[in-house]
Amino acid sequence: LSLFSDMLPVQIQGSSEKAVILNVDVSGSMSGPNIEQARAGAKACVDILGDKDLLGVVSFSDSSTVVAPLSSAKRNADSIKASIDRMEATGGTQMNAGLKKSYDLIANSGFEYKYVITLSDGEPFETDRELIEQVDKMAAEGSSCSFINILNPSGEALLTTLADHGYGAYFYCDNTTQLVDTMLEAIS
């Protein structure tokens, strides 16, 4: 875990309050073990956030859905986890829809530390330019955007570029068991 801990900018020392959105790809390519690990990683994130931290979960495929609205991770842990368990993988990959929905949730949170962590296989339907423009907008307004790629080396170039534009970090998980650890480190 220390390898990921040293790399992700999402870490905040001390008791700094933060707002975190997990933006999860639930397209058909994420079916099977990938969506199971995505669920496990997202639920594990709920447990490590502080008492004053907010967490929201957005899923995206052909469209985007607010799985869990931005709320206290501690007070609403059971509800958030139940919502995460209902995520199913189906459809195409409209990543920009997920990024926009994540931005809408976090933009007016009032928190100084705002993070969007996108989990995807990195093969969206939109153009790179569309995605870069959205990430640039989010970063310009104070949201750091990190990207975790699961099991798809061909998605690396795009997700690395997006992380650079979002003042975040990029990670590649070459097996599904790394995903939980990486997501935990991303918000610890």
Image: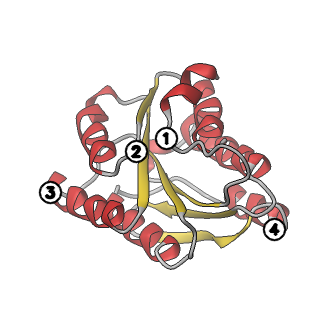
Q: Position of residue 187 (x, y in %)?
A: 62, 45
**Disc 4 secondary structure class:** loop
Q: Which residue is mark 4?
A: 76
Residue type at the position of mark 1 = Pro
| Dot 2 and dot 1 residues touching (CB under 8 Å) | yes
Residue most extreme to the bottom: 108
Per the image, the residue denoted by label 1 is: 9
Gap in angstroms between the C-alphas marked 2 and 1: 6 Å
Category of crowding for the residue at label 3, using alpha-carbon neighbours closer than 10 angstroms: few (below 14), some (14–19), many (at least 20): few
Can you identify the residue that label 3 sits on? Answer: 129
What's the CA distance linking mark 3 and mark 1? 24 Å
Mark 4 / mark 2, whichever is N-terminal: 4
Mark 3, secondary structure of its residue: helix
Whole-number angstrom distance, CA of label 1 to CA of label 4: 25 Å
Q: CA distance from mark 3 to mark 2?
A: 18 Å
**Residue type highlighted by circle 4:** Asn
In this rendering, which labeled residue sits more in front, label 4 or label 2? 2
